[in-house]
Amino acid sequence: MAASFKGMKINPKSFHRSQIKFYAILLPMALFVALPIIFIMFHAFKPTNELFAFPPRFFVRNPTFANFRNLGRLAAEGGIPFSRFLFNSLLVTGIGVFLSIMVTSTAAYGLSKLKFKGKKLLFEINTLALMFVPIAVVIPRYLTVARLGLIDNFLALILPLIAIPVGLFLVKQFIDQTPNEIIESAKIDGASEMQVFLKIVFPVILPAIATVGILSFQLLWNDISGSLLFINDDSMRTLAFYFSTLAAIQGNPIAGQGMMAAASLIMFVPNIVIFIFLQSKVMNTMAHSGIK
Amino acid sequence: MIRKMNHPAWFLMPYISLFLVFIIIPVVIAIFLSFTYFNTIETPEFVGMRNYIELLTRDEVFMQYVLPNTIQFAFIVGPIGYMMSFLLAWMLAQIPHRPRTFLAIILYSPSMTAGIAMGVVWTVLFSGNATGYLNAWLLNFGLIQEPIQFLTSPQYLMNIMILVSLWGSMGVGFLAMLAGILNIDQSLYEAAYVDGLKNRWQEIFYITIPSMKPQMLFGAVMAVVGTFQVGAIGVQLSGANPTPQYAGQLMVNHIEDFGFIRFLMGYASAVSVVLLIMIYSISKITFSLLGEKA
């Protein structure tokens, strides 16, 4: 009888022959998805003669850091050292992720556990905002940033990306699951709402916080449009922006291939490393996600 | 000071202000601008419905290329990407924790870079001369005589865009669905098999999907939004806006073309508003298809 409970095979503890059919589909899919990324890794370390070899070769034979050095040299020739772009990106991303986490999680706590007028409406508007694609608001966003006098200010790179509707949505759903008892007992001891949030709720919702952190990191670290639209001073622009100009600087996209592969790798590695470290927390948050 | 923070405003104000200033107000401005003629230098001039009327009756590029392209792209990438996300997540749930985590990270990784940062892969893979991998391979096997201009010829560009977008479609929605499947109460399956469930397809449709409806809906919204957002990829691949013979021109490219190349911001705003309405309606339709009251 038990054998017919096929659903019991979900989340198995160990390998079983019946899983082979799933591996047979999953492994080729994963390989297909991973190939372009593996390609970038090899390509970034290829010397010039291998980049233009015919027939083209997938694997690198004599790995070199030349492409990475060229990236730095090209930046220096443009008058701005590579380290400056990197510093800008780290600064913007660091401050942005911190602010985003604080702003989003406090708001999520408010929406989940506090009582006030218009709470339901606010959450509905936020859910609606999940559907606003950034490109549709690029023009008015530029006008708003200009009106606020933030052109050529680091804040223009940070502030527009702090409020993330998806982030608020996920954290709010997560906080909904935390029991009210622990909050009530802390309040009896005389703690304020903010104390309750910082000391009791925050540690419990760390998985959701990690998820917002990742989403926010991806937004800020990969963002090009902020540097492009709100910043005129080259020395205040970010790494992602500098990399996006490589094709144009080179004039010929083929000639800069090695450098562009190196640039893609530099952009990609932090994303994947952070995700690998935090993936279990992300999965934990996603279990509570969903539109109810 | 923290000891006195009790009012909801302490919690909500920072988010609400940023949300208003950078998300809601821009949308309201976009709606307002869509009824004006605005060239970024002079003050916007009110023109009523003219932009919308022109978009629907005079803009041949929009009607002939952009709209059909967008619909074709969205109706292939959206549903296929969504189903692929669900099926892959479901299959991942059938294998043990370690290999599952490993494969899930790989499948999710393209969406982290939004596909665009990886542009160089596609330009090299589909490069129009013999050093492009696909061309070299086809030449090598004698399948073609001359290299094909994959990225600049209209007949291939759209298909490559679809392929690249599907490659990056396992995003946040995919993770949510995976977590959703893993968290379904096992006793539900037991009970269902006692009640006469026959096979795994029935299991998926009668137990799995209904039990994780919140994640399915979240995944659907993410799929719809993601699909309409990745349009920049055509410009990235072909290296030109407009794309060759408008073959890969989507709504987002049309907005950029009019907004930032021709500086017709009022008109571009009208296109933006139409895009938002499309995303909203398609999300609603998807919701009702998934059996949720819209």
Image: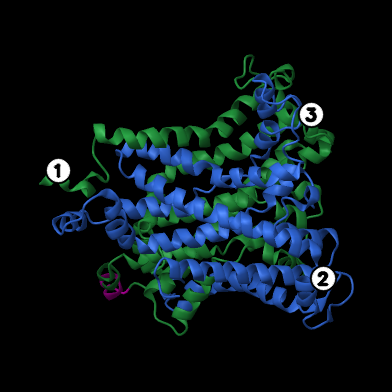
Rendering coords of residue B68 (x, y %): 68, 60
**What label does residue B58 carry, if any?**
2
Q: Which picture quadrant has residue B61?
A: bottom right
Q: Residue at x 39, y 81 (%)?
A: A115
Q: Is residue A164 visible?
A: yes
Taking A265 as reference, is B1 left or right?
Answer: left
Label 2: chain?
Answer: B
Q: Chain B shown in which color?
A: blue
Rendering coords of residue B229 (x, y %): 62, 57
Residue B196: in magenta span: no
Q: Residues within 10 Å of mark 1 (few under 14, many from 20)?
A: few
Q: Chain A shown in which color?
A: green
Please check whether the numbered discs 1 and 3 fall on a single chain: yes
Disc 3, SS: loop
Taking B266 as reference, is B166 left or right?
Answer: left
**What label does residue A255 carry, if any?**
3
Rendering coords of residue B58 (x, y %): 82, 70
Instruction: Quote the CA–CA distance across marks 3 and 2.
Output: 41 Å
> Which residue type does callout 2 highlight?
Arg
Looking at the image, is A36 positioned above or below residue B78? above
Residue A186: in magenta span: yes
Residue at mark 1: A3
Q: Residue at x 63, y 60 (%)?
A: B71
